Image: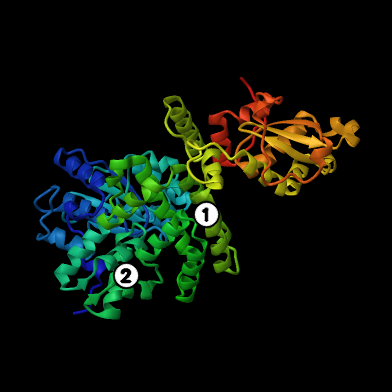
């Protein structure tokens, strides 16, 4: 006896056996039971989802000797002939090769004759969208008012090519892509019947490669049995079909989320050397991040993904450490990478650069995250809780101990400013280039908790207006903040003769000089606000404007 491939051997013979199309099979079964069978149906769906299979089961259900019945017996002559494809009353037509008006006219003429055995003459036209416009028009009248013994069942993968006048005369059923879990379950059950030992990861790899088509999965399994016999593991599937293992995809997903560029480059290089389909890798990563996005938004409802438990647990473990906005940016970058790779000569280079962009997108904070952190800072400040690490923490690391408990050592600060004054002036020059040259003749005189006095050479008193303005003081305050870790109000006074010498390390600030001068610049005042200061330092930002 000739060998029968698994896709034909495992073809469903009852509505209950059809995988993943309950919405279709239940409706058809109910229509038969209630005697509400339409004269024309059209099944729409991608390859391998059960369009032709459903049409044949419906034909059996209508012409079974014990029917019409939603559960054909598969034993009577009518059922056996339909299963064998040689029934006189069930005519299967390939729309791709019989798409002319003459063939449709012959069909129309033959439809007038009564069925040979059963109650109905049933026409199954596969790939009906391939019919020409003239052929469709020749079918219209018969389709609208067929003889009572005629039933039409159409199947198509491109429903948009079917004339609207045809669609309006049919009951339409859309067959969905079969889920990975349903494919895995069907293959597992079939392998058990055939005595084939196969790992769960191998089943999952086959199901991923099938892209929702059960027939493709069964054909792939048939090929693997020829390759490895009755013991199959994941490596066999990956070797034969050029797929990437689930663990590699998960490692790549983790590397992107952690912005681990060296790991990304290493994984891409390993996949390229192993001869993997890099274009397909992008699509699988898209699916991976789509699943992660569903878990982020759906929470406990993510069980609707119908993923194997191990995969679902991976996404649930990743969810707490990322944010939906970042995942959306990664998905956008992957879509752009996929479109570019279709025309690229070096897919590896384009994949590397695309995934590096994804990693950059993963580490960039979203607006929602920034607002959340600002809200948390505001909440902590109002409640009196300890703020996030701020300038006080920086001061603590500079002077030792807890800055909240120990005030800065002001003479030490002054010496530090004196040693770094030229570096501070360079920073000022970046923000206010015109004032830089005038600061070369200045030096820090006194510093306390929130005020800095800067001395200038009296010889250049006429130039005081060049640097004693709001813009210049703010630039200097921000430069000093880089060194001391806090914003200070800045004022200027002439250097005295004794001040022109280098300030000694044991310089003491006189306490009797009075209270610090209040900030003279509005922005400096806001930089001293604890909440504002915390936010600015947390995000390395600037205050551009103040609106109250």
Q: Which of marks 2 and 1 is nearer the N terminus?
A: 2
- Foreground of the two, 337 or 117: 337
Q: In which quarter of the image is residue 38?
A: top left
Marker disc for residue 52: none
Which x, y percent locates residue 309? 25, 55
- Foreground of the two, 322 or 42: 322
What is the spatial separation of the Cα atoms under label 2 and label 1, in whole angstroms? Answer: 32 Å
Badge nearest the viewer, 2 or 1: 1
Please tell me whether mark 2 sits on a helix, a strand or a loop. helix
Which x, y percent locates residue 253? 42, 57
Residue carrying label 2: 220
Residue carrying label 1: 358
User: Number of labelled discs?
Assistant: 2
The crowd level at tag 2 (other Cα within 10 Å; few <14, some 14-19, many 20+) is many
The crowd level at tag 1 (other Cα within 10 Å; few <14, some 14-19, many 20+) is many
Quarter containing the N terminus: bottom left
Q: Which residue is drawn at 20% across and 60% down?
A: 82
Please tell me whether mark 1 sits on a helix, a strand or a loop. helix
């Amino acid at each position: 006896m000739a060998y029968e491939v698994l896709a034909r051997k495992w073809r469903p013979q009852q509505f209950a056996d059809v995988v993943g199309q309950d919405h279709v099979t239940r409706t058809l079964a109910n229509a038969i039971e209630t005697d509400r069978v339409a004269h024309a149906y059209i099944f729409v769906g991608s390859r391998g989802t059960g369009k032709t299979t459903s049409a044949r089961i419906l034909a059996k259900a209508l012409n079974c000797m014990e029917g019409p019945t939603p559960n054909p017996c598969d034993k009577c002559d009518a059922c056996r002939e339909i299963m064998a494809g040689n029934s006189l009353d069930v005519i299967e037509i390939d729309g791709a090769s019989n798409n002319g008006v003459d063939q449709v006219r012959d069909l129309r003429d033959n439809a007038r004759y009564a069925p040979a055995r059963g109650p109905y003459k049933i026409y199954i036209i596969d790939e009906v969208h391939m019919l020409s416009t003239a052929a469709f028009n020749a079918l219209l009248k018969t389709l609208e008012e067929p003889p009572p013994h005629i039933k039409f069942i159409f199947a198509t993968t491109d429903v948009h090519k079917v004339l609207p006048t045809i669609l309006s005369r049919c009951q339409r059923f859309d067959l969905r892509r079969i889920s990975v879990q349903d494919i895995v379950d069907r293959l597992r059950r079939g392998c058990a019947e055939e005595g084939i030992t196969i790992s769960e990861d191998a089943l999952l790899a086959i199901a991923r490669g099938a892209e929702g088509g059960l027939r493709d999965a069964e054909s792939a399994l048939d090929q693997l049995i020829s390759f490895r016999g009755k013991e199959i593991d994941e490596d066999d599937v990956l070797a034969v079909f050029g797929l990437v293992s689930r663990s590699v995809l998960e490692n790549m997903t983790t590397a992107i989320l952690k912005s681990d560029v060296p790991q990304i480059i290493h994984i891409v290089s390993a996949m390229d050397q192993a001869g993997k389909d890099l274009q397909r890798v992008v699509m699988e990563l898209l699916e991976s991040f789509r699943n992660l996005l569903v878990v982020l938004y759906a929470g406990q409802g993510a069980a609707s993904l119908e993923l194997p438990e191990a995969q679902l647990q991976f996404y649930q473990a990743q969810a707490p450490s990322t944010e939906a906005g970042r995942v959306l940016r990664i998905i956008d970058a992957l879509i752009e990478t996929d479109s570019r790779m279709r025309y690229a000569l070096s897919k590896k280079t384009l994949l590397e650069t695309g995934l590096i962009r994804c990693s950059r997108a993963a580490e960039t904070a979203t607006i929602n995250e920034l607002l959340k952190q600002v809200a948390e800072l505001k909440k902590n400040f109002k409640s009196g809780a300890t703020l996030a690490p701020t300038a006080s923490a920086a001061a603590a690391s500079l002077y030792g101990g807890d800055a909240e408990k120990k005030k800065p050592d002001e003479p030490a600060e002054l010496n530090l400013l004196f040693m770094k004054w030229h570096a501070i002036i360079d920073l000022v020059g970046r923000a206010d280039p015109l004032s830089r040259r005038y600061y070369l003749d200045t030096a820090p005189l006194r510093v306390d908790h929130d005020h800095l006095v800067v001395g200038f050479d009296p010889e250049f008193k006429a130039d005081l207006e060049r640097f004693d303005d709001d813009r210049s003081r703010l630039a200097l305050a921000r430069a000093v903040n880089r060194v001391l870790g806090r914003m200070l109000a800045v004022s200027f006074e002439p250097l005295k003769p004794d001040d022109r010498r280098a300030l000694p390390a044991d310089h003491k600030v006189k306490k009797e000089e009075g209270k610090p001068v209040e900030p003279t610049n509005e922005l400096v005042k806001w930089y001293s606000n604890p909440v504002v200061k915390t936010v600015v330092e947390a995000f390395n930002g600037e205050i551009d404007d103040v609106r109250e």
